[in-house]
Amino acid sequence: RKAKTQQFITKFAKVYTPIVFFLALGLVFLPYFWVENYVFNDWLYRALIFLVISCPCALVISIPLGYFGGIGAASRNGLLFKGSNFLDLMTQVDTVVMDKTGTLTEGVFKVQKIQTNLADKSWFLTAVAALESKSTHPIAQAIVAEAGENINALMVNQVEEISGHGLKGEVDGRQLLVGNSRLLQKFGIAYDATLDKIVETIVLVAVDGQYAGYITIADKIKEDAPEAVAKMRELGIKKLVMLSGDKNSIVQQVAADLKLDEAYGGLLPQDKVSKVEALKAEGRTVAFVGDGINDAPVITLADVGLAMGGLGSDAAIETADVVIQTDQPTKIATAINIGKKTKQIVWQNIGLAFGVKAIVLILGAGGLATMWEAVFADVGVAFLAILNAIRIQRMKF
């Protein structure tokens, strides 16, 4: 996936080369009609100088190398770009939309409270954990860790993951629903509505069609999240938005702590898609950062999709344009910065190549430049452009 500048230079070289060839022919023969004391060898020499100067090698080599340098610098900083075009797109982003869990918060949850109306309270946790063991979601993994190895004794069958809701399955012959309030509402199961006022993340459980209890989970904001927000502001990001399937009260608290522009909680995957579509309809260039399987559709829709590589699901990583291998939100700002620096270097190379070639071309056509100047305008400029492209590898981000 080449950057537009790269694609343009490749197409330009295909048109430019034959044009230069015919101009060189004209430089050899046309002066015959108006120059007194016309000497064929002199004008042939000028035409050869013209051809050497006009060679597009400096452009064709140095521009892709600038993007390769940017991708290499990104890799050294824990970022995997899947194409040079995404380096360019990162420079155009004015709105960054982020998932909460695993992106701005640790995604390493811990069980805070277990409440059930079942007589066998130990079976309640073990059964829920056995079903949750079939999910890769961080909340599910926290419940599994709390239950320990006891889950291996239970038989789990007919597991179904309902996107944006939770899990449905059979544990030891009993039907379990484990997820958020939308899951229980979907199956028409009544529960205590006051539970919706609990600030922590809450996992509701139904057994055999009846409400059976809940588990509360705690998470915390990543240490570098405030720094990430500040850096993105410095780099010119105009709007920072958080979208989450988590409870709105939790989402608003995190957004307030991080001083984000907008935050929306209680969203289904299709709701996230709608929010991003609305932002794009405003004419914004949107980058979305997420880590879950629910984020894959939004990552695909965004102008640039970024996925957290450590905590991220396979689906999110597969659909992402950029993978953040270290799961640090500050790497979002790093990706934008590398994109900007790469673009600067590429345009410096374009300016250097065209500028030097234009000057030496004029001198060559007038017989004021020798073959040595012509060689410098081609090979020398290409060498300087390569050195300039390598600079990005030494930059600190």
Image: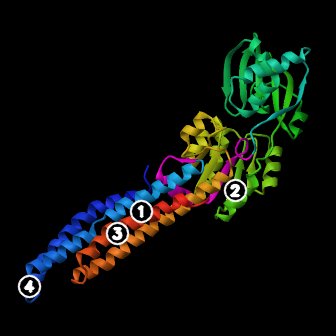
Above/below status of 287 relative to 216 = below
Above/below status of 127 relative to 386 = above
Where residue 283 appears, as percent x and y from the top left, is 58, 59
Say whether disc 3 or disc 1 marks the residue closer to the N-terminus. 3
Say whether disc 1 or disc 4 marks the residue closer to the N-terminus. 4
Q: For mark 2, what is the residue?
A: 240
Where residue 110 appears, as percent x and y from the top left, is 82, 34
Q: Residues within 10 Å of mark 3 (few under 14, many from 20)?
A: some
Left or right: where does residue 137 sit relative to residue 48? right
One can see residue 209 in this view:
no
Q: For mark 3, what is the residue?
A: 380
Determine the CA span between mark 3 and mark 2. 45 Å
Above/below status of 155 relative to 359 = above
Say whether disc 4 or disc 3 marks the residue closer to the N-terminus. 4
What residue is rendered at 74% in x and 54% in y? 262
What residue is rendered at 69% in x and 23% in y? 134
Left or right: where does residue 237 sit relative to residue 263? left
Determine the CA span between mark 1 and mark 4. 40 Å
Q: For mark 4, what is the residue?
A: 38
What residue is rendered at 19% in x and 72% in y? 48
Determine the CA span between mark 3 and mark 1. 10 Å
The answer to the question of whether label 3 and label 2 lie on touching residues, with beta carbons closer than 8 A, is no
